[in-house]
Image (cartoon, grey):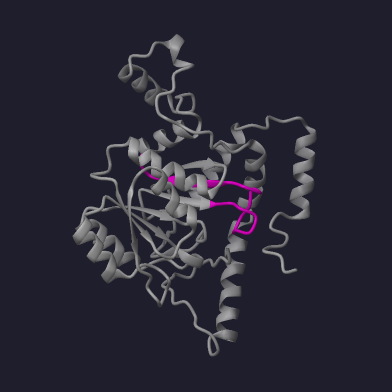
Amino acid sequence: MIKLAENTISQLEIISLSNWLLSNPHLTKGPLVKEFEKLFSVFVGTEYCVMVNSGSSANLLIAYSLLESDFLNNKKVVVPAVSWITTLTPFIQFGYEVFLCDCNQSNLGLDLNHLEEIFIKEQPSLLILVHVLAHLNDMDEILFLCNKYNVLLIEDSCEALGTSFKNKKAGSFSIAASFSFYYGHHISTIEGGAITTDNKKLYDLMVSMRSHGWARDVDNNTHNEWKKDFSVDSVRDLYTFYFPGFNLRPSDLNAFIGISQMNKIQDIVNKREINHFVYVKLLSSKFWIQESKFDTLSSFAFG
């Protein structure tokens, strides 16, 4: 049997995790989650990161937090025809009107002509990109179209951690982006995921809705604003759920592994790039090869 991946988490990391567990540490979401979030946001190049329990949960949280914001003009979203199922299903579950955009047969991204047709005809509020096999879409053209037609952009970057274009990494082109840390992806926390964003309001909503909808995890200024807006006193605040939420939290165990993985992320990205070019050299004369626009720093995923 051919395994999806081997040695994603090394033996040394397992030993380190075992020793940490023997110290009887804090296991649920705690300080290590915050430490991982900081490391990850710095790597991607965004202001904020919200760690969650899977990449699918990341998409779910983005889709719902946007409904609780005032960013959308309507509930219409464009989703790539080539994507993962949980890129699509959260929008269906939350009652969005979904429009599938055809695939660009050269790079497996979006067909720009079809995308513009949808923008003109349907006037959607939202577009989610999927960077298939870590190949970024035609970012210049897509960003131009989103700006022209006033469409908000989000990214499913679960296969594209580390890929960059014009010195910007996947996950930093949009208002929010999702990542997966499943065992077969670039880095692993066994199961896990994250959202990156530069938008403080969206970040606060996601941090709250990640944990049931309470305000315990937001900063003091935001917390006090919500108490005032909702007329909640300090006694009731501890048991007030400000937004309809979920339990999508990771544990400090996941974050402990993630922090270790971040120490070698650049090596992982570089090795995947080398492997890609080996495959291109050996197979391009015999098989179709996905085209890509990328800088020196690139990364290619297989699942």
- Residue 202 or 241: which is nearer the viewer? 241
Q: Which residues are magenta?
A: 180-199
**Residue depicted at x 64% and y 42%:** 254
Q: Is residue 195 highlighted in magenta?
A: yes
For residue 122, which quarter of the picture?
bottom left
- Residue 13 or 61: which is nearer the viewer? 61
**Residue depicted at x 23% and y 44%:** 73
Residue 242: x and y in percent read 40, 24
Residue 55: x and y in percent read 53, 49
> Could you tell me if residue 47 is visible in this image?
no
Question: In the image, is residue 63 above or below residue 216?
Answer: below
Question: In the image, is residue 193 above or below residue 10?
Answer: above
Q: Is residue 132 highlighted in magenta?
A: no
**Position of residue 47 in the picture relative to residue 274 (left or right):** left
- Residue 95 or 144: which is nearer the viewer? 95
Residue at the extreme bottom of the image, as rendered: 285
Q: Count up the numbered dots.
A: 0
Image quadrant where one finds the C terminus:
bottom right
Assign the magenta stretch its main secondary structure. Answer: loop
Residue 199: x and y in percent read 35, 41
Image quadrant where one finds the N terminus:
bottom right
Question: In the image, is residue 114 above or below residue 182?
Answer: below
Residue 233: x and y in percent read 39, 10
For residue 103, which quarter of the picture?
bottom left
**Residue depicted at x 67% and y 64%:** 4
Question: In the image, is residue 127 above or below residue 51?
Answer: below
**Residue depicted at x 41% and y 55%:** 155
> Could you tell me if residue 113 is visible in this image?
yes
